Structure formats: C-alpha cells, structure tokens
Image (cartoon, rainbow, N blue to C red):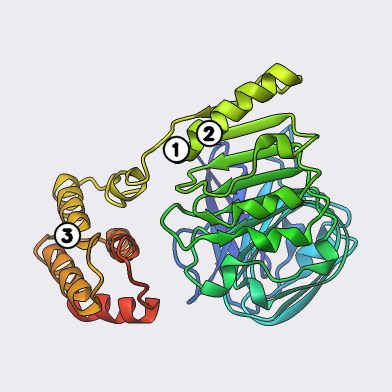
Amino acid sequence: MDIEFSLSLTGENSHDIKIMAGQGSFSIGTIGISQGDYDAWVDVNDKINWHSFDKLNFSKVYKWPRSIEYSGNDTGFVEWSYNRKIEKFYWIPQSDVHLNMTKANIRYFYLDNKNFEIELSLGNLYQLTLLGKLNKIKIKDCLSVFDLTVDLTKTTDDSCFQLPIYEKLKDVASIRILNKPLNKPFDCRSLLQFPNLKEVSLVGNITNLNVLKNLTKIEFLGLWDVPDLEGLPDLKNWENLYDVIGSNIEKRGGQILRRQLKELQKEKKMDEFCYVGQLRDKNWYVTEYNIPFYNWEKHQRKAIKVYKEYLGKLKSLDDEETILKEITNFIKFFNSLSDIETIEREDIFTAVKQLIGSTKLVISEDKIIDLFDSVRDF
C-alpha cells in the first residue's frame, strides 16, 4: 500500500509525494542532473524547507525519514540537525562549498563528490563515508570521527586508490575500504596516516598489505572479496588482535590465514565468530565474480556465454590494437540483441571495463568510453 501526502519542500505544498508503506528513507534528486528514481525533484539551487519533515509521523520508533539522500546545494540540513537528530544523510553537492558541521547531529554522513572543491569542518560523527573525487575533499577541522569509510566501488579515477592526507582524521579508530576485486588495487600505504586504527576492514582489490604490520593497535581485521593476499602480515604481528574474518578471499593466502588463525586460537581467547572461508582460485574473480548480466531477464544466458568466451580470448593478449579489436566485436554482439535498456547498457559497459581489466594492459577510461560509444547502436 502506498502513502500519499503533500510536502512543502520548496514552497507551500510544493510536492505531491507517494512512498511505499514502511519506507524509512527519502530521496531528493536534482532536475537535469540526477539519474535514477527519487521521491522528489528540485532545482540545483532551490532552498529546501527541511522543517517540512517535522510534522510527518510515519513511524512510532524513529523520526521520519530515518535516512535522507539529497542532491543539490542547500546546506540547511546541517542547522536542521541541531534540534532534530539525523540517522543517515547522503549528500551529493553540485558546486564548490565549505560546510561547517561542527554542531551537526548526524550519525552517518555520506559525501559523494562528483568533481567539486569541498571543504569540511566536522563535529562528532560516528561514521564519515567519502565517495568520488577524494583529492578535492579537504578536512579543515574535526572534533571526532570513529569510523572512516571510503567507497571506491563506482570510481576508476587513479587518484582515488591512494588516500589523500587527512591530518584532521588521524585519530580515527576504524576504517573500511570498499573496492571491487576487478578494480585497480587500493594502496594500503595510505592507511599509515591513521596510527590509532583498531578496526580495519578491506573489501576488493588491495595492494601493499605488508605495511599493515605498522598499525600495531589492530584488534579486528576483516577481508572480503580480496583476490590477492600477498604480503599480509602474520596474525601474531598484532598483540591486541581478537577478531578475524576472511571471506571470498584468494585460496593460497586464505589457507595461510586460516592456519594462522587456528594457531592463534590455541594461544589466546578469540572472538567466537572468527571465520576464514570461501577460498577462491584467483581466476574465479574474473570468470565468476560479479558478472554484470546475472540480473538480466532477457538474453542473460547469451550475454554470460559471450562474456566468458571473450574473457578466454583476452586474458593472454598484450597488444592494444588486438585487444580493442576484440572488444569492438564484443560490443557488436550486443548490437544484434533487441530491446537493450539503459541499465543493461550500463552493464555492458561494466563488462567491457572488466574484460579490458583482465588483460595485461592499462587502457584509459576515456579511450574505452570513446570506443564504446562509437561502436554501440543500443
């Protein structure tokens, strides 16, 4: 059952809203810029009446909405939070900005920076999540951030795979790096700027794991979807370590990690939920992990089959001209299929990037985009 109501976001009863019953989130997109489905749409520089949410009472458990996504340039949500705690706020600014959040009452703050100069003055946050152009995000001041999360799953920007120096965040206790197994590897050397880390969670392609031995205060180590564990220090390196999780990690390194964990469990009390499992051959991440076509309703089997065929052709190639010729033929295959939708076009582009990523060459994304757009007719 849907809930329908009027909301005075940019003027008296400016928006007629329809949401699903039980929906705890609300999203506001920018007209002409945002892509996808949003609950409401505004112009990029509209002043938002955040207090229009105050009278809504769709939950007896928490203030509604619990989670807000907003794309636009109004920063009034910070002042709104002074007297109205916000559980989660995901912000996509559309211009350069200095945001003073020293008094904000936001538990989880997500900043998705497309390509702007962003300067933050932070107060007390439980979790700060950064996405997009990291080198254009400056942390001017910070009272306290417990958890820093960096999400690299949607970027191919080389500058993002090693963190800028965030001097004001040096005391964070927990860090989470979210990458994909087939993305460029994240460089762990940039974690050494956080000497007080107690919890380290690493997801996806990671390199220079050996430097983690210098983070001597680690108590929890989590590894997910990591295709190469070369250089990972012995678990005995961390005197305070009591919890380890390794899942969907490469087989050889995973076997060593599992053996080290068993030895450690004999020597001291570890968390009962420690786990190392789902060990994978390195080739598994290329041939089976995250194939883009598994959610297709039509053409799924054909798309997966041709993807694997070209994966076999490309993995041994090291000549750019030959690689791009094969990629051209791969794209042309999808020209022969009917009714390719927008989201499926994005899946095909993802597959193209993954296929090229499986080769021995690095080809710029601009060249990949130009080729993709020049060949496709879907």
What residue did someone put label 2 on?
256
Residue at the image position 67 percent from the left and 36 percent from the top: 235
The image position of residue 363, as x and y in percent, is: 35, 76
The image position of residue 209, as x and y in percent, is: 60, 52
| Along the viewing direction, whichever of 103 and 123 lies nearer the viewer | 123
Q: Identify the element where label 2 is drawn.
A: helix
Counting labels gives 3
What amino acid type should be assigned to the residue bearing mark 1? Answer: Arg
What amino acid type should be assigned to the residue bearing mark 3? Answer: Lys
Q: Is residue 8 visible?
A: no
Q: Identify the element where label 1 is drawn.
A: helix
Contact, mark 2 vs mark 1 (Cβ under 8 Å)? yes
Q: Sequence order check: which comes first, mark 3 or mark 2?
A: 2
Contact, mark 3 vs mark 1 (Cβ under 8 Å)? no
Instruction: Give the vertical position of 162 relative to 221 (above or below).
Output: below
What amino acid type should be assigned to the residue bearing mark 2? Answer: Ile
What residue did someone put label 3 on?
313
The image position of residue 10, as x and y in percent, is: 66, 70
Using the numbered discs, state the Cα–Cα distance from disc 2 to disc 1 in whole angstroms: 7 Å
Q: Sequence order check: which comes first, mark 3 or mark 1?
A: 1
Q: Is residue 351 left or right of 192 when viewed as pictured?
A: left
| Along the viewing direction, whichever of 105 and 26 lies nearer the viewer | 105
The circle drawn on residue 318 is none
The image position of residue 141, as x and y in percent, is: 87, 69
Mark 3 or mark 1: which is in front?
A: 1
Q: Give neighbour class at mark 3: few <14, some 14-19, many 20+ (Cα, 10 Å).
A: some
Q: Is residue 235 visible?
A: yes
What residue did someone put label 1 on?
252
